[in-house]
Amino acid sequence: MRPEDHWPTGQSSISRRNFCTSAGAGFGSLALMSLLQQEATRSVGGAARAADVGQPMDPKPPMHATPAKSVIFLFMFGGPSQVDLFDYKPELQARDGQSIDNEFRRGAKTAAVLQASRRSFARHGQSGLWCSDAFPNIANHMDKLAVLHSLTSDSFAHGSALLEINCGRTLQGHPSLGSWLTYGLGSINQNLPGYVVMLDPRGGPTSGSPNWSSGYMPAAYQGTLLRTANEPILHLHPPSGITRSMQRREIDLINELNRSHQAEHGHESELTARISSYELAYQLQMSAPEALDLSQETEDTLAAYGVNEPKPDWHSLALGPAPFGRQCLIARRLVERGVRFIQIYSGGGNAGGQNTWDGHHGIEENLKLHCPEVDRPIAALLQDLEQRGLLESTLVVWGGEFGRMPVSETFNTGGKPGGRDHNPKGFTYWLAGAGVRGGCTYGATDEIGEAAVEHPRHLRDLHATILHLMGLDHRRLTYFHGGLDEKLTGVLEASPIGEVMLSPP
Amino acid sequence: MYLSKCLHTCACVLACGALIAALPAALADDREVHFENHVRPFLERYCIECHSGQDPKGDVRLSDREGWMESGAIEPGKPDASLLIQVLRSTDPDTVMPPPDTGKVVSTEAIDRIEQWIATGAFDPRTPVASDGLATSGPKKRNRIFTITPEDISYWAFQPLPASVTKPLETVEISESINAATQRIDALLEQRLESIAREQGISVGVNPEASPRSLVRRAYYDLWGLPPPPEAVVAFERDPSDAAWNALIDSLLASHHYGERWGRHWLDWVRYAETNGYERDGPKPHAWRYRDYVIRSFASDKPYDRFVVEQLAGDQWAQENGWSDTQNIEDWRDAIIATGFYRLHAWDDEPDDADQAEFDEADDVMVTLGTAFLGLTIGCARCHDHKFDPISQRDYYALLSFTRDIDPYGLPKKGGGGRGTGRIQRFLVSDEKSQAWDTQRQQRIEQLRSLLEQTVDPAVRLGIEGQIVEQQNSVPPFDAALSVNENPSGPKPTFVLHRGDAHEPRDTVSPCTPEIFLKHTDAPKSATMHSAVAQNRLGLARWIASPENPLTARVMVNRLWERHFGRGIVATTDDFGRTGSLPSHPELLDYLASEFVRSGWSVHRMHRILMRSRAYRMASSVPESQAAIAAFDPEVQYFWRQRVRRLDAESIRDSMLQAAGNLGGKHSGPSVFPTLSNEVRDSANPVSLSGWIDSPFEEHNCRSIYLTVKRSLKIPFLETLDFVNSTSPTGVRSVTTTAPQALLLLNDPWVNIQAEGLARRVCDVAKSSGSDRQEVLWRIVYQRSPTPSERAAITNFLSDAVSLDGHRNASTIESEWIRTCHALLNTSEFLYID
């Protein structure tokens, strides 16, 4: 008996039955098969059944009913400080300056001084959720958010922590969340990439592309970088001097030659897929700029997102809300057009400086730099999605690779106080939109905000939650690799956090 | 299959029956009473609700004996080691069972009774319930308690190769032996196909031979990864004899281009890259020497067993042979460079837990060693016994312990921040020489220091200080290689790590090959395959490279077959275990493996055997007469025709360069950093760009294998066209067909430069030879003449292009010709072989 004799055939199960076609090889044929319908064998290469021509990004039904269609993941690279933003700790405020023992890296403890937040906190909305004055605009939308205060992860270091939140492991080489989602669900709009990543103008995150890699899955599932300056997608436009009509004529010639070549190989549906890929590419050259064209937006909308705000001059690193606002607005436009997964990074370049949320060298300065960059854009995004009826079908996720310590950092700063160090032992994420129970909190850190104590949940539970909200079961969304049914959540137990959902599993 | 399933079940029942029967009757009764009175009610009340069915919580099923055996929740006779007791007695609200939120509270007495049950052997008569949908799906999971079963011993991949292996060929180079092997391949394929056809009641004919042009293209791409020169096709069309075909293969194998092509395949299988990945993505010093070593090894047809031994234990082997920087210098250098194999893995310079990271790195090596050489998913046994294959966790650590003499990749780490690399390179001279050089340098520094002490003049002092710094920073004038270095204090002890946790060492293990391989007592005995394996890396290497190792030869010939036929005889080329595929032609695989070993592990000879076969030379097209088999076997797993295959990323790039006449002549040396576009630079992390210093322009057109492989920033052209991920070993690359690929090939300025080069070349040749341009273009790109309809299409295109072209450029070539060339570089016929 062989594995393929037994794997489930259910239409809604993205399982071995399906992925085995892609296992290790010949996506050429997979590209042509509908993942869910192909009578699979663990084989690859060569020709596929001509009847089942499909593309890797063809939309696939979710495993269970869900209103969710898209995800916007707002990534605060560097690690935002929960105790200055959402996780209000009166005890920390009261004990400012007291000394405690602090584990600042795995197994390494030092005496450190508690540092109260210099922000002031208030309850907001009907739900009365806490938010600090660092986010005056997001504060108006607390009733839409489910705030998870008790997340934990496995690494104190940026590189491995980023990999873990993005790909489920602290080790490099695994597919990212967006890859899993597009592998499981495809994408609705074939004229745009299904998985889009937008970076901070100051640079990419630590480790770069492994954060949006498809790992051992086919490259079709890796994130596409969408640049907001110059060419949004690599190679979107022909070199200068080649007009669109000229290119159309050239594609016609390519098609003509390809069709006569294909006539000799009628059984090779991969060749058919190749011809259509040129048409898709031609469409993409129109649809991508159109999706990014903010001139179609009203002045009010542009103003709400802060798109035209000037770059502040108080700090050489300050950007103001314009870049992130622009990306949030583009994200909304992409969601409208059926893009499955969009990740936007705030903060970029090398970690360790104030160019990211990595506030070692003064948390106040860091907040003053980065909070205004995202506050208005995020508030505008939530409002805009809601007004357009898109919030019901769009899951918005906010967070970073870890949180920050309640103590004043001295380890990295040569003794200079005022910064905060990394903290994977208890940090905050929030969710909003599709299927999310707005205006609730889940779990809690201890009285000073250092470690999760009430309902501590590992990042993989957040992954299971996101997958569940998107209509996928983290246990059944598997990809066969290296002798194992790989899962985003890995081999350890994970479960979705039903408390933050409108209809828990 | 149904019958075998029944037999299997019966065997289980019999085994259990025997076990019970062996117990004294009274005791069995007592156990039954205890189970029914105390255990069954307890499990049903507190556990079964969640821990039953197809998808039990925590993967622990307590509703039948098989369930808890598989999950290991209960270890009969050992209550303290049983997870069930641990969680029942736990005081931690996160782990205690039943979970506090169920409101169920268990009395201490009840737990005592469960403990007693386990202590007395955990008698449990319950069997899986069919309505749970259990016991029917997937490869069968092993029992939790690891034993090698008769099924393991008879598993196909562990069977010894036919005895003929031990009779080496005496006339390896004689063409007849190759032809005989070739005929055997075709006969075995045909037998299999005929029996399938009979079973299915369908007719199968012999697919016709491919056209001479297709064959030459196939041969060039399979062996060189480059398009054939038009003349080579013309010559073979004129004389398509077997002799000419054989001569063509021989000439392709004799070229360095062959080493470049097949070296790249090997680099995929061992996830070669030149940086460490992770946060700082630092360089792996001199990694390119390993790449060149691999190219040289393939080009020179180094016996594969030697290739294996060099990579796993070249340093120890060289020492045994008495090689040094004065004796067999080239052999010695290669043997040292080859051990760079151990240093290719991704490496986190700022791991959260440095102790754990050391084993993550060791595991990366074990995974790669397992898949690349043995086709086994050994890595699955890191945290627990392998769930499907007969590899215990103890086997895993016993294998790992062979490599514990290697100095770790990274320096120890305490606290935050990054850490440096350890002793991961070696000078390619004797220790004496490098030490002598260092002593000399130290002496020079001492001299300078004493001179400094005697000097007063500040200007002179400054000069001397400068010289001291210069000496301190001076690089030894010796070649260096990324390599292993032995730990000066000997191999570190190895323990079985509970759940793979470096902080939970259990039993000590010593170097030993997996138990399953010791089970074939009827196999020809040799010191390298059995208990006498030397307990060092050389012992491990010899065991893997042994003619009696059942996997090594099978795995490698299967890789060769896959590259020539587009699908392995075992389709999962990296996994010969139970989660992989069965061989479609077991006898053929065994035959090829034997031939491989008998010939002294000659890879070149295997190419000759495979490529001379009728199967290899078949057309990829499907004549009407083959409609029935085409419908039955669309995946072509019975090899009744060849496949249409898209070129891999490197071949596409190299072919464009070749067509344009731009392909550079680099054939070794440090990797090339091509210029990145501003778009790519702007969105890259600064770490990815650090060290990215554009190579001299004349190197940019090198073959793709010489381009740098940086883990955080792949060459965009290659990455878009399904370049390998370079972090985990990849037996077979995915091939995707996507819009971004079309955008790349249409719009990348680099492709346009090649189109322009091609246009220029076409015009020059046409002018000098008096042929028409289209003929020349077709010859270069497709190695054939254009058809009348293609001529018409081009004529139309040229005239349209002239009117559509907004502004004529200043190039000496008409831009519509450049567009024509560009279009051809985008066509399927250029990008696929058939």
Image: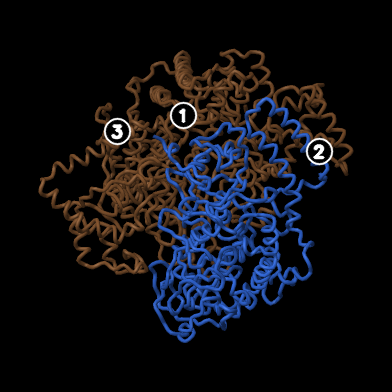
Q: Colour of chain A?
A: blue
Q: Circle 3: is it few (<14), some (14-19), or many (20+) Cα within 10 Å?
A: few
- Is A46 situated above or below A192? above
Badge 1 marks a residue whose secondary structure is loop
Q: Quadrant of residue B311?
A: top left
Residue A383 visible to the viewer: yes
Please report, as a chain letter, where disc 3 is located: B
The residue carrying mark 1 is B569
Q: Position of residue A258 (x, y in %)?
A: 72, 32
The answer to whether the residue labelled 3 contacts the one labelled 2, judged by CB atoms less than 8 Å apart, is no
What kind of residue is marked 2?
Arg
Which residue is at the front of the view, A24 or B708? Answer: A24
Q: Is residue A68 above or below residue A355?
A: above
Secondary element at image label 2: helix
Instruction: Look at mark 2 in the image and give the residue it sits on.
Output: A249
Quarter that holds the N terminus of chain B? top left
Dots 3 and 2 on the same chain: no
Q: Which mark is residue B7?
A: 3
User: Chain B appears in which tint?
Assistant: brown
Between the residue at mark 3 and the residue at mark 1, the CA separation in whole angstroms equals: 28 Å
Rendered image quadrant of residue A322: bottom right
Quarter of the C terminus of chain B within the rendering: top right
Q: Earlier in the sequence, mark 3 or mark 1?
A: 3
Asked whether residue B173 appears in the rendered view, the answer is no
